[in-house]
Amino acid sequence: MFICAEACVRVCALHNPLEPCQTLHPLDSVVIRALQPDDAPLLEEFLSRLSDESRYLRFLAIIRHFTPEQLERLTHVRPDRDVALAAVTTSQRGEEIVGVARYAGLSDPRKAEFALVVRDDLQGHGIGTELMQALIAIAHDQGLDYLEGLVLATNHKMLELMSHLGFQVMPDVQDPTMRRVLLNLTACTAASAEADPDLISSL
């Protein structure tokens, strides 16, 4: 069953992406909006600030530099199949991405595979939870039945978060170092999986 945790950041409309949200120390404000193609420079900066471990946990590979082609793939989505969300804040440096969640539609039209990453120094402030809450709500609204993902067995924080959100955590039959996580979206109630209509319209 999908568990709706208390909101730590608010899902805000794309047309007003800097509307102040609930303060999250040490951030002034955080908004969740659709990741856009012109976010490539912000995304590159975000990825460069991730630790080697966080990049490996996200991409399951050692990537020290992202090519323009990779950044283009990460910022361009198939409108009818994929969703990419960014948690964005403002600071003295300007606008910054502090977390990204996305899903990509699979060959089975009922399913999509998700991914999540939050900047190392801001993990534990609820940003990942809120990104996943928004992603789950959108997937439910778009008529998907299942969200699934592969998580390293040693990624205990991610597995704990997935369990908290109602995902089943199972061994991966093909790789004992991985865990497969699966959320049955048909078990989400309308109240707990309601997507922000402004966010939906901005995708």
Image (cartoon, grey):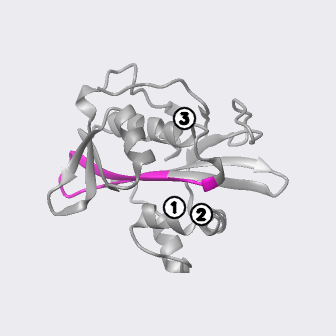
State which quarter of the image contains the N terminus: top left
Circle 1 residue: 54
Q: Amino acid at mark 3?
A: Asp
Which x, y percent locates residue 187? Answer: 25, 26
Whether pointer 3 and pointer 2 mark residues with C-beta atoms closer than 8 Å, the reply is: no
- Main SS of the magenta part reads strand
Q: Is residue 126 visible?
A: yes
- Badge 1 marks a residue whose secondary structure is helix
Circle 3 residue: 198
Q: Is residue 125 left or right of residue 93?
A: left
Whether pointer 1 and pointer 2 mark residues with C-beta atoms closer than 8 Å, the reply is: yes
- The disc label shown at residue 128, or none: none
Quarter occupied by residue 178 = bottom left
- Cα separation, mark 1 vs mark 2, equals 6 Å
Circle 2 residue: 50
| Span of residues in magenta | 101-120
